[in-house]
Image (tube, helix red, strand yellow):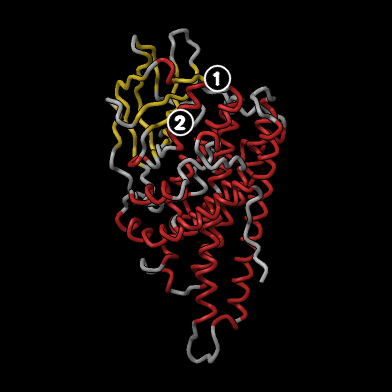
Amino acid sequence: MLNFELQPLTEPGRRFVEACEQCAETFAGRAAAADRAGKFPVENIDTLRSGGLIGAAVPEEFGGMGVDSLHDLALGVSRLGRADSAMAIAYNMHLTIGWSVARFWRTLQLDALADQLKAIAAGQIIAIGGTEAGTSLSFPLTTAVPDERGWRINGRKIFGTLSPVTDHFVFAVRVDTGDGNPQVGNAFAPANTPGLTVLDNWDALGMRASGSNDLVLEDVIIPADALIPSGPWGVWNIVELQNLAAGNIVLIGAFLGIAETARDIAVEMLRTRKKVPDADVLAHRSALQHGTAEMEIGLATMRACISRTATVADEYFARTSGFDVELADAHQLMKEFQCAKYVVNRTAIEVVDKAMELSGGAGYFSSNPLSRLYRDVRAGPFMQPFSPNEAFEYIGKVALGVDPDQPLPG
């Protein structure tokens, strides 16, 4: 029988997706308990290490799997999302940092980047501290100021996904050098750096096992070369746009996986269950056939959207091995991703909602996996960048040729 699920396009990607599928079998058995407890399943990290997935995006010469295709990385994350969506998004936060470091290394050939890639391939975990309450990604309020020992950082991050098991963090910071022209930059700090505290406070509607705790930085000192400025504070720059687009193209694969599993649960139920007084299974009811068709159309839409956008991104990055590209082109890439994100996130919610509806009352019980999928899938729209309202504004500006950094009137 023909299978229309997305397939990898490269040989490293094929090995990666197969490894993700094997890990997913193990994750599926742990997901429900981790969700109920609201705790990150630490043992999953050992499973990822044993499958070679910690260094999936690291070039082979440094001991990694050498997966460079965003299309194939998104497929692997989708396979994990079928089994444990919280684990899929958590893994993505590490996976795509490795991809970005590898891309920097190919262009810059710096020894420090090579050392990072070797550490990742050896099993070290890197996570992102980017999001803050009351601001956006271009305007981090966490500050980095010069110190005789390097940089002193103060601030607080939210949604610190993967934080319970991270070896190193990358923090988005406002770099204040005293000249009145702050920069935005990325600061690297080991998880055990004095002054850096990971709170145990993640308690959310869904993605309950993602370990997305708050991160508090109080006079955290890092060496001078552990901070990389990327451009003026509050203004989009090429590096930031490219990295955010790439990482999040992979991330939306998790929501495809959620929808695929919800569809499978609903279809299996309709194929096997009967309801008195009918003598046949529920699959023969026309209304339920119609609902199933809606799910199939949704999955076809999501698969086409992810495959097309990820392929376009792969072609873009293959043409732009360095960073000497036009800012306008980076905005066009981000615009295309934002269109895909909106379609995939909203369609995933619709598919899961339809699966819940087709299940009758069965999916409403906490013991049914649909109840977890129903909660987890709702995390997609507000994940940055952007929330839906912000996305429409950004997409419209880029399409109309309006500078996305232009403030709203008034």
88 vs 19, nearest the viewer: 19
Which comes sooner in the sequence, label 1 or label 2? 2
240 vs 168, nearest the viewer: 168
Q: Secondary structure at mark 2?
A: loop
**Left-right relation of 41 to 409:** left
Q: Secondary structure at mark 1?
A: strand
Identify the residue at horizontal 45%, vertical 31% (top origin). 135
- The quarter of the image holding the N terminus is bottom right
Residue 154, placed above or below residue 384 = above
Q: Position of residue 399 (x, y in %)?
A: 71, 36
Q: Residues within 10 Å of mark 1 (few under 14, many from 20)?
A: some
Instruction: Write down the residue under mark 2.
Output: 135
Q: From this viewpoint, is residue 409 visible?
A: no
Cβ–Cβ under 8 Å for marks 1 and 2 = no
Residue 266, placed above or below residue 81 = below
Instruction: Write down the residue under mark 1.
Output: 231
